[in-house]
Amino acid sequence: MLAKQLAEVRAERDELAVAERVLERMTGQLAKERAQAGQVGGRAVMLIPHREPGVGEDSLPWDYQRIITAVRQAAEPLMAREVGEVVGVDVGVRAKLEPLRGKLVRLVDRGRLRKLPDGRFTTRL
C-alpha cells in the first residue's frame, strides 16, 4: 500500500515538473511580448503599424522586416513553411512554424502583405 502511494506521489511530482516547465515557457513568451509592446501616454500602441504613407518598413521589428524581404525577393507567392525556410525557422517543428504564421497574418492584417485564397503570401501591389 505504501509503495502504491509512493508511486502515485512520484507520478504527480513528474506531472508538476512538466507543468512548471510549460508555465515558465509561457511566462517567458508573455514577458517577451509585453517587452515588445510600446506605450504612449500610458496606452498600448501597435508594434506592427498599419501600412500608411510615411510609415515605412523600417518602423517594424527586424524579424518582421526579414519576413517581408523574404516574401518580396521570392519569384512567386510563398507558403508559410517556405517563408520559414528562407528566414531560418525550423519548419519541421510545428511550435516554431505557428508563430511565424501568426506574424504573416499580422502583416496581412496591417496591409503589408497579401494572403492568396490558396494560403500563399505575397507582397501588396
Image: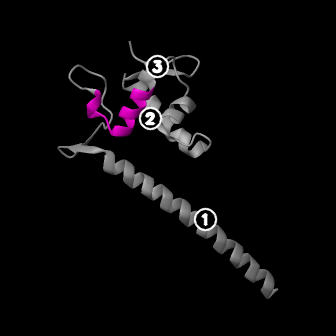
Classed neighbour count for the residue bearing mark 2: other residues with Cα under 10 Å, few (<14), some (14–19), many (≥20): some
Q: Is mark 2 on a helix, strand or loop?
A: helix
* Quarter in which the N terminus is drawn: bottom right
Whole-number angstrom distance, CA of label 3 to CA of label 1: 40 Å
Q: Residue at x 55, y 59 (%)?
A: 22
Q: Which residue type does callout 1 highlight?
A: Val
Q: Is mark 3 on a helix, strand or loop?
A: strand
Instruction: Based on the picture, tell me whether residue 42 belongs to the magenta stretch.
Output: no
Above-or-below relation of 94 to 3:
above
Whole-number angstrom distance, CA of label 1 to CA of label 2: 28 Å
Residue under numbered circle 2: 103
Which label is found at residue 122?
3
Badges 1 and 2: C-beta atoms under 8 Å apart? no
Front tag of 1 and 2: 2
User: Is tag 3's residue or tag 1's residue first in the polypeptide sequence?
Assistant: 1
Q: Range of the magenta residues? A: 57-70
* Quarter in which the C terminus is drawn: top left
Q: In which quarter of the image is residue 43?
A: top left
Residue under numbered circle 1: 18
Q: Which residue is drawn at 56% across and 22% down?
A: 119
What x and y, as percent, mark residue 69? 39, 27
- Left or right: 78 as drawn, with respect to 61: right
Badges 3 and 2: C-beta atoms under 8 Å apart? no
Whole-number angstrom distance, CA of label 3 to CA of label 2: 14 Å
Q: Which residue type does callout 3 highlight?
A: Thr
- Left or right: 39 as drawn, with respect to 95: left
